[in-house]
């Protein structure tokens, strides 16, 4: 969850990092797009509404992308999983139809992280409520569902976008940077600083691969401060939250009976959130992501700032396809 609010300021070219020239980017054979081998369904509780949500993840054709669809709203427009369809970032990432506010799907970040970690490019996500199920508060159950459904290769190359100029967005003492990265594997690093002593200051970094996602990020759960829960409930939020699907911290104490899954579960979850939020680029984003006290709001603003500046990114899809055919 992310409680950042207030005025946000985008910057570009503010980091002293040299742009990667096209001579430095070495196209490789383009990997194929993938979808699910077959549809799979599950039922779970929504974190914020507390409602029982039926979800089906279905295969989709090449070039379709990840798309969410409300099945409980008559004639609801499909919601592409893209940064420009994000309508809210308070406590979760919410996709929505701006002209029809009730057509929205919240808490998509954990499922999007699983899609990214499992290298699924195309899928239709059907939900009969305003959010996805939270399951245990991590991406583990989503990965399990995708594994059960299986992967199927398709006949188009994955869309690959390379960051070639630095992008920075910030709010007070929180910031996110997307930096040029001369590697085929995205890199993520983040630091957090919470007053709760059970969390404190934590740092983490990794190169993002399917293996590192599964082993290092997928199992880490969302978290909340005990003193904030009553206010969230009064605001109609976190109504489905419990010790079964979130870590709850009371200053220096973790209230979950089984404790943490790893000592730095908090920062690992924040990076997992970033993986899901960045997959809303609608493509594989090759960059070095750096964040400090960041969350859904800054993650989304970084994507908006990146794609608003055409010189800051390069679509590598055609270059890779040409290289593969040569």
Image: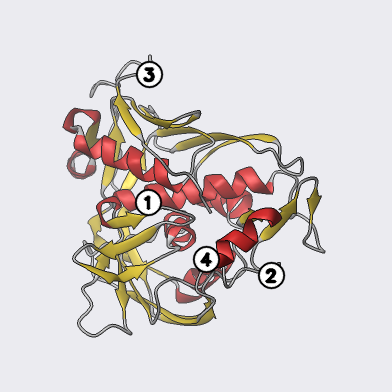
The alpha-carbon separation of the residues under discs 3 and 2 comes to 41 Å
Left or right of 299? Residue 154 is left
Residue drawn at (19%, 38%) of the image: 319
Q: Secondary structure at mark 2?
A: loop
The tag earlier along the polypeptide, 4 or 1, is 4
Q: Residue at x 27, y 41 (%)?
A: 304
Q: Residue at x 49, y 55 (%)?
A: 91
Q: Earlier in the sequence, mark 3 or mark 2?
A: 3
Q: Going from the N terminus, do you reach mark 2 or mark 4 first?
A: 4
**Mark 1 or mark 3, which is nearer the start of the sequence?**
3
For residue 144, side relative to residue 5 (left or right): right
Residue under numbered circle 2: 244
- The residue singled out by tag 1 in the image is 279
Height in image: 155 above or below 60? above
- Secondary structure beneath label 3: loop
Q: Which residue is mark 3?
A: 15
Mark 3 neighbour density, 10 Å: few (under 14) some (14–19) many (20 or more): some
């Amino acid at each position: 969850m992310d409680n950042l609010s207030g005025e946000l300021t985008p910057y570009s070219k503010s980091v002293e990092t040299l742009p990667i020239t096209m001579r430095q980017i070495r196209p490789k054979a383009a990997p194929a797009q993938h979808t699910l081998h077959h549809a799979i369904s599950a039922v779970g509780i929504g974190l914020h509404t507390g409602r029982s949500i039926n979800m089906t993840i279905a295969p989709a054709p090449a070039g379709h992308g990840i798309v969410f669809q409300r099945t409980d709203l008559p004639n609801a427009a499909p919601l592409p999983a893209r940064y420009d369809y994000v309508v809210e970032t308070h406590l979760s990432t919410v996709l929505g139809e701006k002209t029809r506010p009730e057509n929205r799907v919240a808490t998509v970040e954990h499922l999007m992280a699983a899609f990214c970690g499992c290298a699924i490019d195309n899928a239709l996500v059907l939900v009969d409520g305003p959010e996805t199920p939270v399951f245990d508060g991590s991406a583990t159950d989503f990965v399990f569902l995708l594994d059960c459904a299986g992967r199927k290769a398709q006949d188009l190359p994955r869309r690959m976008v390379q960051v070639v100029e630095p992008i920075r967005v910030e709010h007070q003492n929180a910031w996110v940077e997307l930096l040029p990265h001369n590697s085929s594997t995205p890199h993520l690093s983040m630091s957090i600083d919470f007053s709760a002593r059970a969390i404190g200051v934590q740092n983490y970094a990794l190169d993002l691969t399917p293996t590192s996602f599964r082993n290092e990020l997928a199992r880490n759960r969302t978290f909340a401060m005990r003193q904030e829960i009553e206010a969230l409930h009064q605001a109609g939020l976190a109504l489905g939250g419990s010790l079964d699907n979130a870590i709850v911290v009371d200053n220096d104490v973790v209230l979950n009976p089984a404790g943490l899954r790893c000592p730095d579960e908090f920062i690992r979850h924040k990076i997992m959130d970033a993986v899901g939020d960045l997959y809303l680029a609608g493509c594989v984003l090759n960059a070095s992501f750096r964040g400090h006290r960041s969350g859904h709001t800054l993650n989304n603003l970084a994507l908006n700032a990146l794609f608003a500046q055409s010189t800051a990114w390069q679509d590598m899809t055609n270059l890779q396809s040409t290289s593969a055919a040569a």
